Image: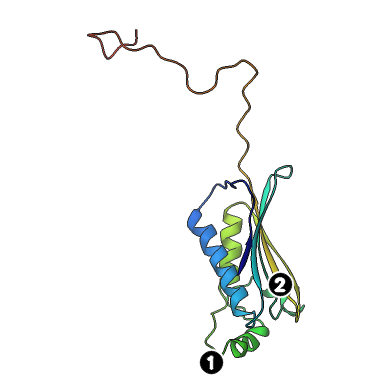
């Protein structure tokens, strides 16, 4: 498991639990569909001009057949590669998920105002990318304008409830 992160912190607004759940789901799927010796990478890229952060999970796993791609975000859909992935990971048939994971990912990301895209090649792997809106940049102060909160004189002795 590898990571490519931005050198600066990325601030997003929204439900932290939903975003965490979406990322964990994508990483778990990537691990499930990648045979031993394969690679799973998580990357974060920010495009400030477009106002978007992109969080992607890429694997060198089984990939998704083209006929499955239009359906992978549907609830309870289990693609054709699930059985192959279960065998590759040494799981008993039917031990995989219920087909809810990617629909939950999509719902969580859309709830944050974003979208999910996928690119996949059978036998080579997949890349799922969460495109999430960045919060608006704070307004820049005009040159010479005070920054921070306005100053306040200390209260007069004997009258702590009134400014001086």
- Residue shown at 53%/92% (left/top)? 92
Q: Position of residue 3 (x, y in %)?
A: 62, 62
Q: Nearer the viewer, residue 30 or 132?
A: 30
Q: Separation of disc 2 and disc 1 at Cα?
A: 23 Å
Q: Is residue 66 left or right of residue 142?
A: right
> Residue under circle 1?
92
Circles 2 and 1: CB atoms closer than 8 Å = no
**Residue at image coords 61%, 23%:** 141
Q: Secondary structure at mark 2?
A: strand
Residue 99: image location, x then y, percent: 57, 77
Picture disc at residue 155: none
SS under mark 1? loop
Is 13 or 158 nearer to us in this picture? 158
Q: Position of residue 68 (x, y in %)?
A: 71, 78
Q: How is the image coloured?
A: rainbow
Residue 22: x and y in percent read 56, 63
Kindly indicate the quadrant of the structure image that contains residue 37.
Answer: bottom right
How dense is the environment of label 2, judged by Cα within 10 Å: few (below 14), some, or many (20 and up)? many
Residue receiving disc 2: 126
Crowd band around label 1 with a 10 angstrom C-alpha radius: few (<14), some (14–19), many (20+) = few
């Amino acid at each position: 498991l590898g990571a490519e992160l931005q050198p600066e912190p990325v601030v997003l607004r929204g439900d932290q639990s939903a975003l965490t759940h979406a990322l964990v789901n994508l990483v778990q799927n990537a691990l499930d569909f990648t045979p031993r010796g394969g690679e799973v990478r998580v990357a974060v890229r920010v495009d400030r001009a477009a106002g978007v952060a992109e969080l992607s999970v890429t694997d060198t796993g089984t990939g998704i057949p083209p006929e499955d791609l239009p359906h992978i975000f549907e609830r309870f859909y289990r693609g054709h590669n699930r059985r192959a992935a279960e065998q590759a990971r040494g799981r008993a048939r039917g031990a995989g998920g219920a087909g809810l994971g990617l629909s939950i990912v999509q719902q969580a990301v859309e709830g944050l105002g974003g979208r999910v895209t996928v690119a996949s090649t059978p036998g080579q792997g997949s890349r799922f990318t969460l495109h999430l809106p960045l919060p608006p940049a704070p307004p820049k102060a005009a040159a010479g304008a005070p920054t921070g909160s306005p100053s306040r004189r200390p209260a007069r002795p004997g009258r702590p409830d009134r400014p001086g």
